[in-house]
């Protein structure tokens, strides 16, 4: 599977080279996948059941609700899955909850026929290590072309990144990141994410999400 992923995503004419990230390095990408790729068997046996307790409608996208009904939500403007400050803020919440792993499930949108990337990282991973996988890291963290589901073993929280939502308020496409968490852990997420909330999000979220979001500002 790793060799197939290297081949499918290793197109030197694709967006990675266009955004000035340097040259494709398949050796680096292969080493990164060997370290962090989550095999399908392990995903289906252990991680998919946890994912299903957090998310619903995983074959759909915004404005459909993708979080289970018992989760409170936080909304942020997106554009990619992670920027460093948002990653490290989420990492602080994971550590407060005692999570040991970070799981990222990639949902291809632009090229639906390619195999998705499934990644598993230690929750203590540094940002520099997260970004060390050449074009694989770019696809996971910085691409604005696909959707992503993120969670960990506790099942207490999840993150959904949508990169293709039509916002009727400004007649334009909007990228959104939504974090869901069980209400009992509101204090943890309030502590870490309050400084990152923006007033503008109150009008940018789809109605189903707006009504369930927690606002700390």
Image: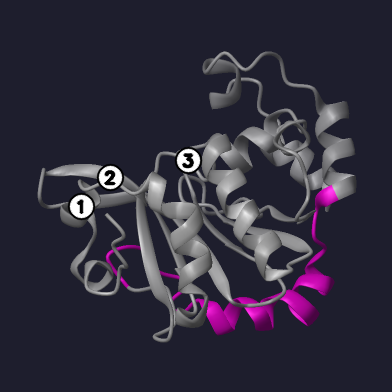
Left or right, 86 with respect to 88, comes to left
Tell me the residue at 27%/65% (across/down): 63
The magenta span reads 36-64
Q: How crowded is mark 2: few (under 14 residues within 10 Å), some or many (20 or more)?
A: some
Question: Residue 126's spot in the image, x, y percent?
Answer: 75, 39
Disc 2 secondary structure class? strand
Between the residue at mark 1 and the residue at mark 3, the CA separation in whole angstroms equals 16 Å
Query: Would you place residue 171 above or below residue 184 in this image?
Result: above
Depth check, mark 1 against mark 3: the one in front is 1
Tell me the residue at 11%/44% (across/down): 171
Query: Would you place residue 163 above or below residue 68 in this image?
Result: above
Between the residue at mark 1 and the residue at mark 2, the CA separation in whole angstroms equals 8 Å
Along the polypeptide, which appears first: circle 1 or circle 3? 3
**Quarter of the image holding residue 32?**
top right
Q: Quadrant of the C terminus?
A: bottom left
Query: Would you place residue 31 above or below residue 114 in this image?
Result: above
Left or right, 198 with respect to 132, comes to left
Q: Residues within 10 Å of mark 3 (few under 14, many from 20)?
A: many
Q: Is residue 40 magenta?
A: yes
Count the marks.
3
Residue receiving disc 2: 174
Disc 1 secondary structure class? helix
Residue receiving disc 3: 80
Left or right, 190 with respect to 164, comes to right
Mark seen at residue 119:
none
Question: Residue 142's spot in the image, x, y percent?
Answer: 55, 35
Residue receiving disc 1: 204
Q: How crowded is mark 1: few (under 14 residues within 10 Å), some or many (20 or more)?
A: many
Question: Residue 194's spot in the image, x, y percent?
Answer: 39, 53
Depth check, mark 1 against mark 2: the one in front is 1
């Amino acid at each position: 599977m790793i060799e197939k992923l290297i081949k499918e995503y290793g197109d030197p004419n694709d967006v990675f080279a266009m955004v000035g990230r340097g040259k494709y390095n398949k050796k680096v990408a292969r080493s990164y996948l060997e370290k962090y790729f989550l095999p399908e068997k392990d995903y289906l046996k252990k991680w998919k059941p946890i994912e299903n307790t957090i998310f619903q409608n995983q074959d759909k996208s915004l404005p459909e609700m993708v979080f289970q009904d018992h989760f409170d939500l936080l909304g942020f403007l997106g554009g990619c899955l992670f920027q460093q400050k948002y990653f490290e803020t989420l990492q602080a919440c994971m550590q407060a909850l005692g999570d040991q792993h970070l799981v990222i499930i990639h949902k291809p949108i632009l090229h639906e026929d390619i195999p998705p990337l499934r990644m598993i990282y230690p929750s203590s991973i540094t940002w520099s290590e997260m970004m060390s996988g050449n074009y694989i890291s770019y696809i996971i963290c910085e691409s604005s072309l696909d959707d992503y589901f993120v969670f960990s073993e506790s099942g207490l929280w999840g993150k959904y990144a949508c990169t293709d939502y039509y916002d009727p308020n400004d007649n334009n496409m909007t990228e959104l990141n939504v974090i869901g968490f069980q209400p009992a852990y509101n204090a943890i997420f309030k502590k870490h994410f309050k400084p990152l909330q923006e007033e503008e999000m109150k009008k940018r979220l789809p109605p189903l999400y707006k009504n369930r979001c927690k606002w700390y500002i």
